[in-house]
Amino acid sequence: MRLGRHSRPAGPGQVTPAALVRLRAPACGQPAQPSPPTWQHGGVTAATHSTLFPQVPDSADAVLEGLDPEQREVATALHGPVCVLAGAGTGKTRAITHRIAYGVRAGILQPSSVLAVTFTNRAAGEMRGRLRQLGAAGVQARTFHSAALRQLQYFWPKAVGGSMPRLVDRKIQLVADAAAACRIRLDRGELRDVTAEIEWSKVTQTVPADYAPATAKAGRETPRNPGEVAQLYAAYEDLKRERGVIDFEDVLLLTVAVLQDRHDIADQVRAQYQHFVVDEYQDVSPLQQRLLELWLGDRDSLCVVGDASQTIYSFTGATPDHLLDFRTRHPGATVVKLVRDYRSTPQVVRLANGLLAQASGRAADHRLELVSQRAAGPEPVYTEYTDEPAEAEGAARRIRELMAAGVPAAEIAVLFRTNAQSETYEQALADAGVPYQLRGAERFFDRPEVRRAIVNLRGAARFGGNDSQLDDAPDLPSQVRAVLSGEGWTSEPPAGSGAVRERWESLAALVNLAQDFAAARSGVTLADLVAELDERAGAQHAPTVQGVTLASLHSAKGLEWDVVFLVGVAEGMMPITYAKTDEQVEEERRLLYVGVTRAREHLHVSWALSRSPGGRPSRRPSRFLDGLRPGSTATAGRSVGGGPGGVERGFTSGTTGAVPRRTRRTPARCRVCGRTLTEAGEMKLMRCEDCPSDMDEGLYERLREWRAEQARRSGQPAFCVFTDKTLMAIAEAVPDDEGELARISGVGVRKFNRYGADVLAICAGQEPGAEEDED
């Protein structure tokens, strides 16, 4: 929807500003409705999954069903600034889409007043699709660039006059022309790298004259002499002006300029959009942050979601500082931590946590300790090969075995550090007869065969009664198969790989979608399917293509598979050779962490000792695997970062009694035997379950009696006051002061403020509430 053209800004009385709404989640243990299963008893599906064609919830309360306690906190926190720290696989998209849908369905948020922004068209499309399934159609879910472009197109005649300059899709040719004008020769690699430098400069708001000092300050390696890059950058900008074109970064820069200079236009945008949600907030650049601030104005109706441990795009100007500093900029913010991992097995999660336990830097200090919610699975498999072709053949062989055992090809991925590694695996899979697809290729609904197929399906839906090829097709799936057979679909895939196989895979995806659609909804017609395809095309909600995915680790962000092969995990590739500084090496570690957390159940990690057959076996496994793979030696551990999941309420400037900040801790190790602790319950006790306890039994019983009375007064289950493990940890530690109590896992800000005085009194042998009674 273009701002101001197809809808009017919400006027007074049309919507309640979200900043004024204070909703409370139902009390712990008190479900919104009596009968449906709760998240603890089978109601929650994998947080990153949903059924293909779910029923739209019939009420606002129904939107909340199946959310775990922390996700529900996100969904009902519709007031003020909210920061969601969401670990991999913890259901962040589920939480924020249910948050928007709950606000819309409850009549608190007007759909047209909500702007949700993320970083890829795929993510924005997925968000729109989920909101549609939750009954919240009409909410704007876009990338930063898409949202800014629509505003710029609409306001350009008013702000600047005339027609808006043409937008160039690819700037690399302009960079080549700028190099020719400067008489600087660039090879293909340098051309690509200089283009990336120009993009970095623009998103960090660095002008050509400041490029050299800015790169020196950032410790950034440049593809050419910084003076030459600055010269090319200036020539590039001159060429754009001469030709009357703009690039994607200009879209953001120009939108920022318009909103800064024209207060009337800024007011119009702010009247339209009154509630903002930002996904993947750790990837925000300084320029995007400035645009967000201009959209917001002096309001605080903002929800941001991110994970500093998944910051892998700093080379583009992204920085997690805006996420990590959110509480400083917004002291009254509600912070919710999602650490329940519904995606991966405990074995995969243990490896992921272990990777970050050895990390350093600011992002590592705020890391989230994931807790798997899935049943146990197989241990990660580590394999060493003599050379890269042998590694690719080994992966292809194992993939064939998995597919023979019933694992769908679409649930398998091969992930590598650089795109140059792809060719070896393409050849190995083709030789093994395994279908595959390259991630990052043309979007599904933009493929020519898909567009033709939808045109033919639409024609058959309109005139199918006169189409002889549908005479023997009684149901929707058979009708789709009949129509698409004319486009090249056959019941058996063609032999080999290449373009013919890729076209067949696209058509097969449409056939499978028709079968799922018919199974989910009785009596559907071709016209219904075409309408569904049109909506999916608009949302870029593509059906699954049956083929093993080949992808770089960067392009795999946000995706997941049952089986993941992480290949080439050797020094020089992971971390990559040109990662020199500590910050660059830590980003490489986070990149591997992202790769590990793509796996739901099976994880295969491999490396080759040499590049080619017969080569000198000089390579060694990545340092990131030290202490994690069998037979390797552990490196020094790091402090536990973000701690357990939960909610922290913001404090206003006048608030007293705030919890002292927790001090940084060493890695969680058993205080009896010294073993590293990984289970949440053991980490609360700071000892292994089977190690002897020095708990004060009398204190533990007094704490249990006090907890029972608190639960009776509040009408909540006892575990909502404190869990047994937390009471045991308190009885073992016997804290003397607020600082010692605050350091116990399970005693968060809210519980400290509510129960801290009572607990310390009990630990001191006093009656809880005695001081209040004396006053």
Image: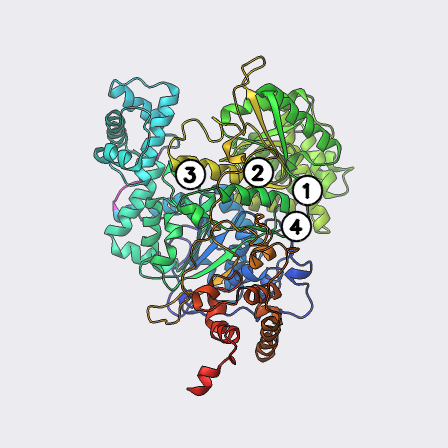
Identified at 70% across, 50% down, the residue is 520
The numbered mark, 2 or 3, whose residue comes first in the sequence reads: 3
Label 1 element class: helix
Rendered position, 184 above or below 757: above
* Residue type, numbered disc 4: Arg
**Mark 1–mark 2 distance (CA, rounded to whole Å):** 45 Å
Q: Nearer the viewer, mark 1 or mark 2?
A: 2
The numbered mark, 1 or 2, whose residue comes first in the sequence reads: 1
Which residue was labeled with disc 4? 374
Q: Main secondary structure of the magenta part?
A: loop
Left or right position of 439 against 288: right
Which residue was labeled with disc 3? 313
Percent position of residue 420, x then y: 50, 23
The numbered mark, 2 or 4, whose residue comes first in the sequence reads: 4
Identified at 63% across, 47% down, the residue is 346
Which residue was labeled with disc 2? 628
Rendered position, 64 above or below 183: below
Inspect this view and state whether residue 137 appears. no
Q: Nearer the viewer, mark 4 or mark 3?
A: 4
Label 3 element class: loop
Percent position of residue 140, x then y: 46, 52
Which residue was labeled with disc 1? 514
**Total label count?**
4
